[in-house]
Image (spheres, grey):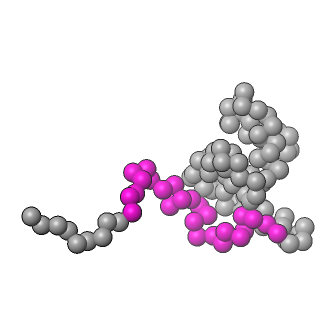
Amino acid sequence: MSTSTAAAGPARDSRPDRRDEAACRDADPELFFPEGDIRSARAQVKTAKLICRGCLVSATCLSWALASGQQAGIWGGLTEDERHRLHRCGPRLSTSRRLTNLTKESS
């Protein structure tokens, strides 16, 4: 009888890690958590949103942030305030419908 002496590695989830596909994967994480004076924070928000706009998994990111109750940072291209307004629209609307309504409010 032979036994393996190799250490067992951590169990991996069979689902693909969406972070590998994220446009922000090489960006400084601090960019998505703006701080500092108003002008600097606004510039960070704008830059973060531009990165999110071109991301293939931004909807997944936003869904995760909403489901897990993320309070801080920019997730899926939305700030804390924008996610809060989106959440206020209520579960009766689909996420895409709430995003459409949010976009109209912000215009």
Q: Residue at x 86, y 72 (%)?
A: 36
Q: Residue at x 90, y 67 (%)?
A: 38
Image location (x, y in percent) of residue 99: 73, 40
Q: Is residue 34 magenta?
A: yes
Left or right of residue 20: residue 58: right
* Magenta segment: 10-35
Q: Nearer the viewer, residue 5 or 104?
A: 5
Left or right of residue 104: residue 91: left
Q: Nearer the viewer, residue 28 or 1?
A: 1
In the image, residue 89 sits, relative to residue 62, either above or below, namely above
Quadrant housing the C terminus: top right
Q: Residue furthest top?
A: 92
Q: Is residue 89 magenta?
A: no
Image location (x, y in percent) of residue 43: 81, 67
Q: Is residue 100 visible?
A: no
Q: Is residue 28 visible?
A: yes
Left or right of residue 86: residue 4: left
Q: Residue at x 57, y 51 (%)?
A: 57
Image location (x, y in percent) of residue 30: 71, 70
Q: Residue at x 54, y 59 (%)?
A: 19
Quadrant housing the N terminus: bottom left
